[in-house]
Image (cartoon, rainbow, N blue to C red):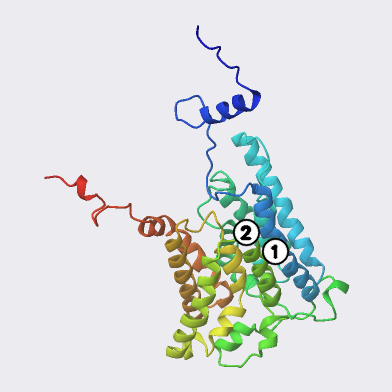
Amino acid sequence: MSAPVPTPTASQETRRRRIELLPAGGGGRFAVARAPYLRDGVGVRGYLGAFALALVPAVLGAVALFGLHVLAVIALSYAVGLLMHYGFSRLQRRPRPDEGILLTAMLFALVLPPNPPWALVVLGSVFAFLAREIFGGLGRYPFQPALVGKALLVILFPAAMARFWEPLAGGAGFAQWAPAEPATQTPLTAVLQGQEVPLGTLLGAQPGLLGGAFAGLLLLGGVWLLFTRAVDWRIPLGMVLTAWLGGGLLTMLYPEVLGPSGLVHLLSGGFLLAAFWLAADPVTSPMTPRGKWLFAIAVTLLIVILRGLIPWPEEAIVFAVLMMNALVPWLDRVAAPRPFGSSAGGQGQGGKKG
């Protein structure tokens, strides 16, 4: 007489269903996603929210230095982004909103000068979100959207983009709408002209981009991103080390072109904003570890060189990051780890033809 077949318990049935989902062709469903790839159960909203949250100290510092109109610039950029995203979502029939709109709008506002014309804020936001949405939104755009909008404004309206303002002109920014006195030069242009700039001026309260006027607060937000592991440490660390060592070496070789100090390249012109946010964008940066190192070194050297060559040194980060964004697929292909046992030609020894 055969033994009775035991009835599986509820836990065994659950385990069996989970196992049956794994083999291909077993009827299971697999999640397919584009970069950035997430882990540890962190959703896209929380992941991108960490980048936006780390920018809050820099935003508050910009408001304190230049006035309450900074919040209006961010709000206007955000409004344009919502309209652009809504229109493209209807055309492409996307199911839900994109969580990266807030971050893109904030980054675009922070790469602008302190008191930009409202029409240029709208125009640049349209360019930025067009470069983002035309490729399909989050995870699909090849170039950093905020920098695309800023690059087109620099090309079309260079005089307006090169007009900076003196921080704390007329009192604390929280008590005024906008700065009253335009600045004659930024610390970066002053150093490139052979003048000395105190370290305290570089760490905070310097004329320049909204996101680069308070380098100390940017560094604070960047360290928080590293501590929470929201950003890959290779690109920020690679850029900082290259600016400190490589930038110093280049300025020693060509001081009349690149200025006398590598520290200035690190703490001015929005470099830290590029290191922790713009260049480290997980969508437009390499995915391989070696590719990230190569990307960070190349971007930093381009920034230092362009600052000594182009007439707008504060905009060097814009063109350097965008140029390297175009080379990201090549960097990932070159820096991809070679399969175990493969030869230099890409075939294993067993795969060679006789």
Residue, far right: 175
Local packing at callout 1 (Cα closer than 10 Å; few below 14, some 14-19, many 20+) is: many
Q: Please give left or right for residue 299 compared with residue 122 in the image.
A: left
* Depth order, front residue of 237/312: 237
Q: Please name the amino acid that badge 1 sits on.
A: Ala
Q: Please give left or right for residue 142 compared with residue 226 in the image.
A: left
Q: Please name the amino acid that badge 2 sits on.
A: Ala
Residue 168 numbered mark, or none: none
Please give the name of the residue rendered at 72% of the width and 78% of the height, measured from the top-left corner: 165
Please give the name of the residue rendered at 52% of the width and 56% of the height, measured from the top-left corner: 284
* Depth order, front residue of 197/169: 197
* Depth order, front residue of 101/1: 1
Please give the name of the residue rendered at 44% of the width and 70% of the height, measured from the top-left corner: 298
* Quarter of the view holding residue 92: top right
Rendered location of residue 97, percent (x, y): 68, 42
**One can see residue 316 in this view:** yes
* Depth order, front residue of 303/353: 353
* Quarter of the view holding residue 150: bottom right
Residue 230 numbered mark, or none: 2
Local packing at callout 2 (Cα closer than 10 Å; few below 14, some 14-19, many 20+) is: many
Rendered location of residue 252, percent (x, y): 46, 90
What secondary structure is marked by label 1? helix
Residue 54 numbered mark, or none: 1
Earlier sequence position, callout 1 versus callout 2: 1
Q: Please give left or right for residue 120 compared with residue 312 in the image.
A: right
Task: Say which quadrant the C terminus sits in.
Answer: top left
What secondary structure is marked by label 2? loop
